[in-house]
Image (cartoon, helix red, strand yellow):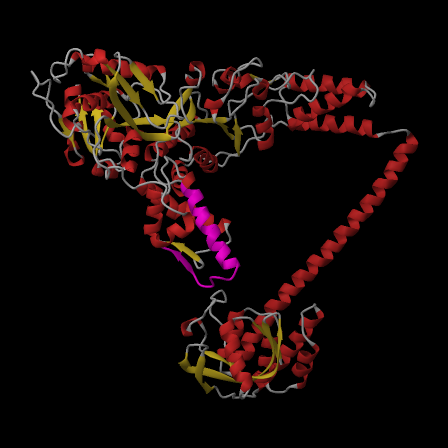
Amino acid sequence: MIPITVGRPKVKLGLDSSWASDRLAVFVSQKNPRTENPAPNDIYSIGTVGLIRRLWKVDNEYNLAVEGLMRVYLKEFSQIEPYLAVKVEEIPEISQKTEETEALFRNILAKIKKYGELGGVLTLESSIHIFSTDDPNQLVNIITASIDLKTQDKQQILEMVDTKTRLQRLSELLNREIRILEISSKIDTDTQERVGKVTKEAILREKMKSIEKELGEDDESREIFEFKKKIKAAQMPEDVRQKAERELGRLSKMSSYNPESSYIRTYLEWLVDVPWVVKEKSNSDVEYAAKVLDEDHYGLPKVKERILEYLAVHKLVGKIKGPILCFVGPPGVGKTSIGKSIARALNRKFIRVSLGGIHDEAEIRGHRRTYVGALPGRIIQGIKNAGSKNPVFMLDEIDKVGVDFRGDPSSALLEALDPEQNNSFSDHYLEVAYDLSDVMFITTANVLDTIPPALKDRLEVISFPGYTEEEKFHIAKRFLIPKQLEAHGLDRQKAEVADSSIKEVIAKYTREAGVRELERAIASMFRKVAKKIATGKKAKKIKISPKQLHAYLGPHKYSKTIAETKDEIGMSTGLSVTPAGGEILFVEVTFMPGKGNLILTGQLGDVMKESAQAALSYVKSRAKILNIPEKFFGKMDVHIHVPEGAVPKEGPSAGIAITTALVSAITKIPVRREVGMTGEVTLRGRVLEIGGVKEKSLAAHRAGLTTIILPKANAKDLEEIPKNVKRDLQFILAEHMDEVLKVGLTKPLPKEEKEHSKTSKVKHEDLRHIPQAV
């Protein structure tokens, strides 16, 4: 008899039915044991009819004692629900006794005896049956059921009809199991010998300590000897070795009670632990690097291309004495993670040090040894932790380094990041030169404005723009969802997010340049799924559809488009760039009785305030054309407000948006709400070039705008914009405010004396003269 444990509800229903009738059941193996609800196609076609001798329940499971009766072939499934029922046909047992089968029979008995001697598990009942039977087929059945074999091997023997073939296959499997047991036995013997040796060494060491104590030798002498060995093994430069030996000489003459001895001991430990010659063997295969970057990150073609160019030069030259790479972009776009990919591609260690909030220069250069608790700086600490002198070293958040009375950490970085100087970097704690020229430094920042010019001059900036909705969709499918499934103990058999749901989460629950908020939204959904499964409310696979998003994530946080609302008088849509990526901003203008004052609110910076003053001056200069009475501006105050007053705003690129809102408020002509605009305006109405065109275009696309007005001088920047964004947006290139007003207002202005120029309309299909973004 064989014990069997059953826990699936469907199988238990079948057993209840069998136990209540003739106690017969067909026992068949699954092809894939992980399948929770097997269909007819998921089980083998040959099984065994068994008689259930005993059945008892333990902890919601059935325990059975089953006696096998006959092998059967599953002809037809007569029932699928509530449990499987099948019509079977008996496979007759034909015992073929020949001299050859008799030889195999005896050979198997000898092997099963050896199997037991080597520690193979056999129950007493099985052993009695094995050595008491004279039927070869019965012997094969008993041994196969009793020893630990793979399900596929057992099924193979079960399906064989020829007695000789069954005996031969069982003999092969027993040979394999005996070899495994012999190897395991040898491993146990070797382990015991090693344990005995270790025990012997421990006893000898204790004796040696007693002898040394009697001879007057102590631990300090041994420590000095160990330091000498480590100094020699470290292969330090000559000047560093001499300094280490001088410090070791001082330590050897000091009493262990002298407080300075612990400082020297710590200093020597740092000197011998820092890698002076150890290097990782770099992988210089550019194709492999490209493959790694594509595996770890979706999109970012220009970023990857620049990194591969950098690595290609590194391969040809060996060392690069050039600018340090600086990844600049909003949070969550992959700056830090692509540094890890570079390290993986080069087969180097990766070290990341966050510089955000650091104010003390000693964090970079280390503290002088005279201070209590002094340590080397972050750079030397990172290299020690890496264990090699050529890691990929990422200095994260370099734009957030602070300055105060303790020094300027960014100035301390100049030496480390300058390829002409860092071959002899001086740490205040080590007080010896350390060669950083083999280190590949990478820095990251959200904005460049706060990085000092001298430090910025040593950096080669690689911009990380925000992702489009299409790119976010692919990132979620390829990276975020598998990562969060694993993090929450789920898999695709338990939970799935529909493609339409991912797109709706991107459009209506997140509005960011990166994907961190998207990842948090996905994690929030999977937490709720995990709770349902853990509490037993859902046993089957859960598929999250768009209709269910409200239950998982709550109401929509953002509207898909802002173009659905009506056109407003005195309100225009501008575009800006923030540390978090591109954003849209609204400019509101209203006039009220007063004395001609200009009121500016919304936390505007000095440059933006001056831009508003220039816009108002331009409108005043066009008073006649706009049919504005001469005394209008003297009797009316103008209030310009940019909503989200808690967020500081700065820059001149809102000039044309402010001007358009002013003209709209005066003429009572609404501004087209689906039009976004960005550009600096002069007193003569010229529209000047601005930056951040790609980020602003992505923000306009996310917000649902359909038209963007840009300075004509920014036509060259359109090639950087992704093709799917170009396809959905119309770009208007303007040189003068008159062209902006023609597009931005819903109705033409009063007839002007003359036109400055014709409006340039640029659509995706008309950009033949502009190189397309790759």
Side (left or right) of 451 relative to 588: right
Side (left or right) of 151 relative to 192: left
Query: Where in the figure is residue 649, as x and y percent of width and height?
Result: 36, 22
User: 557 or 90: nearer the eye?
Assistant: 557
Residue 40, relative to residue 556: is it above or below?
below
Query: Where in the figure is residue 397, as x and y percent of width and height?
Result: 47, 26
Query: Where in the figure is residue 163, as x and y percent of width and height?
Result: 53, 83
Q: How many marks?
A: 0
User: 335 or 389: nearer the eye?
Assistant: 335
Residue positioned most to the front: 593
Residue 39, relative to residue 86: is it above or below?
above
Side (left or right) of 172 relative to 89: right
- Residue 223 part of the magenta segment: no
Q: Which image quadrant is residue 405 in?
A: top right
Magenta segment:
518-545
- Residue 531 part of the magenta segment: yes
Quadrant showing the C terminus? top left
User: 386 or 557: nearer the eye?
Assistant: 557
Residue lying at 76% horizontally and 51% vertically, measured from the top left: 195
Query: Where in the figure is residue 336, as x and y percent of width and height?
Result: 46, 33
Residue lying at 22% horizontally and 38% vertically, measured from the top left: 728
User: 294 or 197: nearer the eye?
Assistant: 294
Magenta part, dominant SS = helix
Residue positioned most to the right: 214
Asked if residue 679 shows in the view, the reply is: no
Q: Which image quadrant is residue 711 in?
A: top left
Quadrant showing the N terminus? bottom right
Asked if residue 267 shows in the view, the reply is: yes
Residue 644, relative to residue 631: is it above or below?
below
Q: Which image quadrant is residue 385 in?
A: top right
